[in-house]
Image: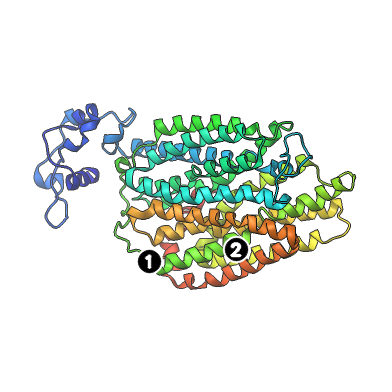
Amino acid sequence: INTLINFSHRRPQSTMTIDDAAEYPERDDLITPLYEPSCKGDSARPEETGTTRSSSNNVDNDKEPILGTASLMGKSTSDTAAQRAAYAAMFAVFVDAINMMCIAPNLPIMVTPGLHEDSFPSTEPFDIATAQYAHDAVEALGMVISNFVFGYIADRIGSRKAILLLMIGSCCTSVGIYLVRSNYWSFIAMTFANGLFGSAAAIANGYMFIIYKNDREKADEFGGYVMATLMVGLTVGGLFTLFFPSNLFRPLLLSSALCFLAFVVCFIFVFVPSESPVEIDSEPEEDDIPLDKRAISNVIIGASFDHLGTLGIYPLAFSPVMYQRFFLDFQIANKVPIMSGNEYRWLFSMIGLAAVPAALLMPLVNKKLGVAISTIISNLITAGAIIALLSVAAIDPPTHSSFVLYATIIYATFPFALLSQLSSGAMLDRVTPHDQKSLAQGINNSLYDFATIFTILFGWISDTKGYNFALFVCFGLSIVGAFVNVPLIFNKRLGRKEIGNGYNSVGNADCII
């Protein structure tokens, strides 16, 4: 009944029955409501108007819901269609992350001339760290552009079309990178092109807030899953390098095939957000949330410092610090390295799984402390972890014990460092109108990508001033980020009280666990 009330608000009347609508899904605008709402918005009940449902209007709920009329099929089938669409979008995020990460663990080897048969002959005028992070920087620049462009496209022509364009574009550019693998600067150019199609996470995140716009907790839950899926995809993509130890670029071909598969999956299961089948009985989300410019600015500035500071743990703590200290220095001295190349690939790849405990911790910590306070604590933990890593790396000579301790500190602290990054999307959602949510999530993802652009600067600092100085800069940025986020504690939509009333950053913690 509630569903039909909603249809009577936005659909013209007709003599078309529900059975007819099921046969003609393209004419779902012709459905006749069972009763009309009153002028004041209060709905008259069927028993008050004498309206009854005829037996000819029964619908078989066991059948697959048609997108145009799914909301008439019952809540269970509607939820099923929405979940399939959400999982399909998450699969696109998973594949997109694989595509971005599938050769990343090999980059230090690629940009060290003569170290491997697939290494570039020259990376002039860059040294090792700068050449490596030039790749990350141009890819991130492409992703920043992609987040804004495809966020706008998703808000104007639909998230489905945006996701499909991203998948087919990534499929083509991955092959392009493989074809130009013999020249460093051609490789950099194609990497930038690949980044232009790397905003699947932003679009999918906004898509969750659209298809579940009437269920705040479900939207937050799937929003958290999107970010966790992204990190798991990064892990799996890194592990692809272990399948092809003799060919550093071949994982690109496998990721290209997966991008095409994701295109097919999304084409089948992802529906247009305006045709979302989800209509639930809970209180709907307000569509007229005012644009809170002050809060948005605060979140963006704080998240920017946060992301820049976190670079000290990932990726700088891996390369140049771990790569040089425990591997390359031994190679140059013709000694057996403490860390092998495959061990580095494993450690670099598996760090993405830190998103799993972070996703589990986030709703619990945010509900207990509030999203702003948990973000501040996350910044301070990041700063402390950087100091600890520098202390261990300074042990001379490096030993197996110091190597194990170094890796343990990274894996023990990185989940806490991720808490603030996983929360920024939900914070922006709370202070953004409904028709700008995809763009807001694009901005959120762009913050990380924008920070990644600066890795080339940190790489240059490492090559010229030493990696100790580069990590000390990240330490200072994390401290600044903590102070910048303090005003968010007093925001009515981001404070602890509101989080306890349904504004938590992920949703139902028990459901996630």
- Mark drawn on residue 292: 1
User: Badge 1 local density, few (<14 within 10 Å), some, or many (20+)?
Assistant: some
Q: Is residue 497 visible?
A: yes
Q: Nearer the viewer, residue 185 or 341?
A: 185
Indicate left or right for 222 with 332 as reference. left
Indicate left or right for 301 with 214 as reference. right
Q: Residue at x 90, y 44 (%)?
A: 334
- Name the element at disc 2: helix
> Label 2 belongs to which residue?
378
Task: Tell me the quarter of the picture where residue 17 sits.
Answer: top left
* On screen, residue 51 above or below 136: above
Query: Picture coordinates of residue 218 (x, y %)?
Result: 42, 49
Indicate left or right for 5 with 290 as reference. left
Q: Residue at x 11, y 36 (%)?
A: 14
- Mark drawn on residue 34: none
Q: How many marks?
A: 2
User: Badge 2 local density, few (<14 within 10 Å), some, or many (20+)?
Assistant: many
Indicate left or right for 267 with 355 as reference. left
Q: Nearer the viewer, residue 102 or 349?
A: 102
The amino acid pointed to by label 2 is Ser
Residue furthest to the left in view is 50
